[in-house]
């Protein structure tokens, strides 16, 4: 037996027989690759079904599947902010949020990790001098494992007429409680056990992304097998909610036995 303390396959779904079977069936019926950008010939039914499922799961109007979480973040921020705008990131934000922010051409500033007071101070000082403003943070931080105080952050951002983009890469399937941001991106490669990225948002935002997010337009669609596997994993996740409790229960037992902080 192998016990892994370091992979992101939190629920072991990458090896679930139903997930494997869904991927195999998709390859058999739709081929190994998408064959083109989704805007040309690379769309296939699994992507639409997955987007419907992700939007329902997150309670948003719509969703869009990207080639990976990294590609999603490279495309989302530059589609919403540009020269003259402001992007404020939690200082511990993932590398691809930084990459998207820099690529946007907006002014990029940080606020202290999980510190709504510092966010408010930065917005008070800099928000008036910029057109649009976007706040970037993560639901569960990838390296430290702590959670953003999203209620406070969303309220402060809104009071300064700024949107918030939350990276939910480590939340979906494991830590799902708490408020939702207007923009929630994530990955299909962690608890969902497959590969690919997504954005859940309002219909107008998703429509904008399909023509403006360059990492969506100018790259090949996600392969059928990856989309079908993620779709099946999402179905399992929703039908068996008790699975979600297990990784946290194991983590608590581990930290308790070793005398580490939760
Ligand atoms: C893993 C991760 C990503 C990237 O997702 P991929 O689908 O692997 O490209 C983005 N953001 C965070 C916080 C991550 O941990």
Image (cartoon, helix red, strand yellow):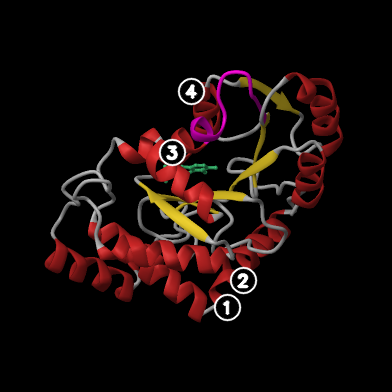
Quadrant housing the N terminus: bottom left
Within the magenta stretch, is there residue 80? yes
- Compared with 157, 123 (above or below) is above
Within the magenta stretch, is there residue 200? no
- Compared with 247, 134 (above or below) is above
> Label 3 vs label 2: CA separation?
27 Å
Counting from the top left corner in percent of width and height, residue 39 is at 27, 46
Magenta span of residues: 77-88
Quadrant housing the C terminus: bottom right
Counting from the top left corner in percent of width and height, residue 239 is at 49, 81
List the residue tagged with mark 2: 245
Residue 248 seen anywhere in this rendered image of the structure:
yes
Q: Nearer the viewer, mark 3 or mark 4?
A: 4
**Callouts 2 and 1 close, C-beta under 8 Å:** yes
Label number found at residue 70: 3
Going from N to C along the chain, the mark reached first, 2 or 4, is 4
List the residue tagged with mark 4: 103
> Label 2 vs label 4: CA separation?
37 Å
> Label 2 vs label 1: CA separation?
6 Å
């Amino acid at each position: 037996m192998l016990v892994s303390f370091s992979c992101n396959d939190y629920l072991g779904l990458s090896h679930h027989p139903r997930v494997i079977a869904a991927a195999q069936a998709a390859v058999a019926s739709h081929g190994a690759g998408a064959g083109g950008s989704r805007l040309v010939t690379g769309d296939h039914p699994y992507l639409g079904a997955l987007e419907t499922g992700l939007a329902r799961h997150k309670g948003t109007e719509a969703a869009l599947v990207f080639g990976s979480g990294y590609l999603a973040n490279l495309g989302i921020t530059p589609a919403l902010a540009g020269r003259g705008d402001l992007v404020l990131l939690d200082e511990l934000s993932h590398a691809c949020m930084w990459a998207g922010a820099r690529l946007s051409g907006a002014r990029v500033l940080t606020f202290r990790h999980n510190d709504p007071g510092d966010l408010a101070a930065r917005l008070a000082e800099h928000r008036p001098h910029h057109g649009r403003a976007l706040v970037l943070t993560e639901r569960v931080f990838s390296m430290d494992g702590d959670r953003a105080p999203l209620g406070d952050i969303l309220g402060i951002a809104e009071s300064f007429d700024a949107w918030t983009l939350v990276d939910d890469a480590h939340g979906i399937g494991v830590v799902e409680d708490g408020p939702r941001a207007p923009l929630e991106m994530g990955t299909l490669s962690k608890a969902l056990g497959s590969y690919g990225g997504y954005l859940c948002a309002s219909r107008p935002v998703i429509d904008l992304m399909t023509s403006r997010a360059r990492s969506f337009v100018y790259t090949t669609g996600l392969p059928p097998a990856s989309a079908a596997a993620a779709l099946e994993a999402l179905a399992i996740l929703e039908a068996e909610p008790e699975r979600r409790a297990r990784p946290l229960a194991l983590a608590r037992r581990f930290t308790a036995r070793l005398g580490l902080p939760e």
